[in-house]
Amino acid sequence: MREYKAGIVPATTQMGRELLEWLGKWHFPATIMLFDEAVDRKTMKEHHGKLYGHYPPNTALFETCDILFDCDEEHPLSLPSSEKIYIIHLHNQKSIGKLVIPSLNIAQLNPTDHKIQIPFAAFMLFAAIYGVIEKYQQVNQAIMTSLHSVAEMGDAACMDLANQLHAYEQGESIESKWFPLPDVHPHLPLLFQALPQTSYFTLNGESQEEQLFHRYAACLGYDLALSLTCVRTASLRGLSISMSFLCDDEIHLDELVDAFSSDPSMICFDDIQHNMYPICADVIHDYRIYIGRMRKSDSHTFTAWAVCDDLAIRCSAAIKCAFYILHNFL
């Protein structure tokens, strides 16, 4: 049996570490190679009692891999001979390659799709919930507010938030070098407030992430009006979304609740009598979506609250794509 190789680039980011965790949990049948700029020669890295080769980025080594997981937000991976390798992109850059959400369209992957884009967590969560609703309703409009943790921005941003809390505890001035973005001035403290900006603004006033949301929806052929505000919150991990869907026909709430309850990628957590609903603390290190606060705002509007682990949902999607590639194309 052929031995497969998969690489994580770079491996020491939050996304890279989470990927390695899930590859181990799901016993991915390949030799895993770790790549990082900080490494100047091959070393061995131990993780959960297992040793992995740790290498500086090297095109020749990249080309020995069957699959590469690209986690680099600043410099998306590009290889001149990438037609030999399947590259799965997990960053929030502009769309690169075929957009894939495993629960919706993994069967549409072809052997020639050597560049695959995993969308950001907010779109994955929306698409999964919309995919359930559209089986029962014609949706005309979706209005959403997504609350993003700092995990999407990496370790330095997480440390910046921790330093803000430390400064507050010491009675010092709360300052930031990372929010809303590292090179956007003035910097604003995130602690105790939310910032309605998760990426750079475009000329029409949308953030790049909000704009990318519309582009992804168009790629999947969604025919509905979308209104989205992405908000950065003072949380270290997890994503929450408040969403409302305006439908043509009258909403039958029990029907939708049953549909969400039977979906294996979701957990319904909705007990208003005991003030119970999903929060991010419930989903950390879980790849599923938790949904609650399901209700009819009016006879034609379905409203809900949903949360997910912003890292785990994307890493698990990338690995599902990798399994599909191994079993069908290699």
Image (cartoon, rainbow, N blue to C red):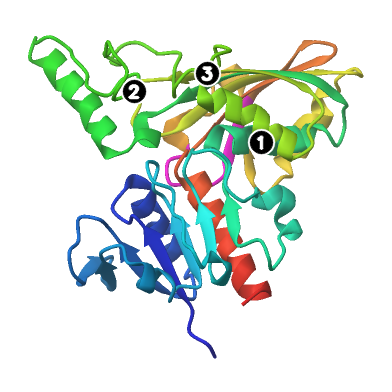
Neighbour class for label 3 at 10 Å: few (<14), some, many (≥20)?
Answer: few
Q: Residue 51's x, y, as percent?
A: 26, 73
- What residue did someone put label 3 on? 202
Which quadrant holds residue 272? Answer: top right
In the rendered image of this protein, does residue 154 appear above or below residue 316? Answer: above
278 part of magenta stretch: no
**Under tag 1, what secondary structure?**
helix
Residue nearest the observer in this picture, 156 or 300? 156
- What residue did someone put label 2 on? 181
Q: Residue 95's x, y, as percent?
A: 58, 42
Residue nearest the observer in this picture, 151 or 200? 200
Residue at (26%, 14%) from the top-left corner? 187
Residue type of the residue flagged with mark 2: Leu
- Counting residues from the start of the chain, the first of labels 2 and 3 encountered is 2
Q: Which of label 3 and label 1 is nearer to you?
A: 3
Residue at (23%, 67%) from the top-left corner? 46
- In the rendered image, the residue lying farthest to the right is 249
Residue type of the residue flagged with mark 1: Tyr
**What range of the chain is rendered magenta?**
283-292
